Image: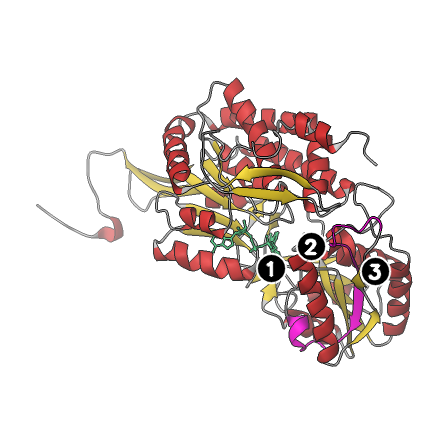
Amino acid sequence: TVSFGIDDTLEILGIKHVNEGSSTGLNQFSNGDLIKSYSPVDGSLIGSVKATTKVDYEQVVNAATSAFKTWRLMPAPKRGDIVRQFGDKLREKKEALGKLVSYEMGKSYQEGLGEVQEMIDICDFAVGLSRQLHGLTMHSERFGHRMYEQYHPLGVVGIISAFNFPVAVWSWNVALAWICGDVCIWKPSEKTPLCGIACQNMAAEVFAKNNLPEGISCLINGDYKVGEFMTKDSRIPLISATGSTRMGKTVAQVVAARLGKTLLELGGNNAIIVTPDADIKMTVIGAVFGAVGTAGQRCTSTRRLIIHESIYNQVKQAIVKAYNQLRIGNPLDESNHVGPLIDSGAVAMYQNALHQVVEEGGTLIVEGGLLSGVGYESGCYVKPAIAEAQPHFKIVQHETFAPVLYLLKYSGAVEDAIAIQNNVVQGLSSAIMTHNLREAEQFLSHAGSDCGIANVNIGTSGAEIGGAFGGEKETGGGRESGSDAWKIYMRRQTNTINYTTDLPLAQGIKFDL
Ligand code: NAD
């Protein structure tokens, strides 16, 4: 258990007590409604934050638009230095922020710390990237001409994030957007508003220390209606939205109607294929962590295990045995493996999934159920469950954001397993457990996994920031974090320069005057 209490944590993070949380990053007076944040860990009220009103929002956008004019002119490596300072601030407050993440969202303290580490990592990545925002040069078809492309800052980036990664997803976006010369307005999930305030406080401190204007980092609070302020606003050229596919479909249409850009990171239905050549011990670790880590509330959580019939019983027994050893309870107690779900709505969805899989003909081999009594007073603790099911079941095709794992059997070759895996609408993360090179390469080939993430001999969750993160199909197609994901935060320009005294036209066109 962590040594400091939650009051100390709130103090370290500069979060004032109930009813005093600032409504926006600009700390202006607001008459917005109070959003109350209750911890799923013990059900207590941690604090309240004022929702952003339309009036507040206009002030935020004006501050952001005006700050952009200053920020875009700062050389990118100098912007990188500000992000470096922000990374240092995160290092300084890592334990406190990790604890708040754990307490407000319900993931284990280790995972809370891991989330903050991910923020630090993306800052480091962005610092180096700030010297590498390069375009190509190309040879012109015209004599005495030069062509090249460059990337310019885009403007105000709107970030909408989900409850399950209450701080990391924001950092993946802002660290890159800031070095690209953009300013950001963030609407965190209404289920984790205090994490938003804590991050905004840290960013504001760094910008103020460097005499930079308010508005480079902005925060707005509220539910989808506050999100809509941004999605409908043509002053915001890019909306990066992380959350459910349902949300993504709405956001994509609203932003497209004004021809804005979207970066969408939506739901997954991730599978691990377990072939006859799999290492069973590794499979069990990967599958169990993937299915029950963060109480099954990661976008990359393992939802389906597609197991070859020849080893099906062996894998099933090993996994059930591992589930019997799981300890469920307060996530701040490091001896527990599984913490609570986010709220009672999530518990209801979990219960509904268990009911539905049985109704469709599945069998629960690890029963699951809601826990009650001492230590479980919040009403959000559930037992991870396992069901034997068929790939086509409606519930198996659906992303249930809870610790419910479906065991599916395949016979025949690896292509059959790949077909089952790909036959869902989502396309985020996938994995194969095999020591057979042919199977592994088939899984990664053009005819293999159709997901944005495809792993060999590791599970579906736990991506590193160096690679581009995101998925295909109803996962939304966006890519964040590493590789060349930065390009979406910039506008691209092709330049042709003529250094002759003639004006030849392209394609040899003659236009004599
Ligand atoms: P959610 O869709 O309920 O909410 C996500 C965010 O979108 C919240 O901030 C919410 O207020 C906002 N929102 C909802 N409707 C909106 C609208 N019409 N306009 C503007 N904003 C709107 O999701 P959640 O329950 O917080 O998170 C769980 C979901 O997020 C899961 O489906 C999970 O897979 C997904 N997720 C995906 C990734 C990824 O990278 N692909 C990462 C984390 C979570």
Binning the other alpha carbons within 10 Å of mark 2 as few (below 14), some (14 to 19) or many (20 upward) gives many
Boundaries of the magenta span: 374-397
Question: What amino acid is labelled 1 in the image?
Answer: Gly
Question: What amino acid is labelled 2 in the image?
Answer: Gln
Q: Check disc 3 and report its element: helix, strand or loop.
A: helix
Give the Cα distance between marks 1 and 2.
11 Å
Q: Quadrant of the C terminus?
A: top left
Residue sitting at x 90%, y 68%: 317
Residue sitting at x 62%, y 31%: 17
Give the Cα distance between marks 3 and 2.
20 Å
Q: Check disc 1 and report its element: helix, strand or loop.
A: loop
Which quadrant of the figure has residue 266?
Answer: bottom right
Membership of 99 in magenta stretch: no
| Among numbered discs 3 and 2, the one appearing first in the sequence | 3
Question: What amino acid is labelled 3 in the image?
Answer: Thr
Query: Viewer-nearest of labels 3 and 1?
Result: 1
> CB of residue at label 2: within 8 Å of ligand 1?
yes
Horizontal and vertical percent position of residue 463: 68, 49
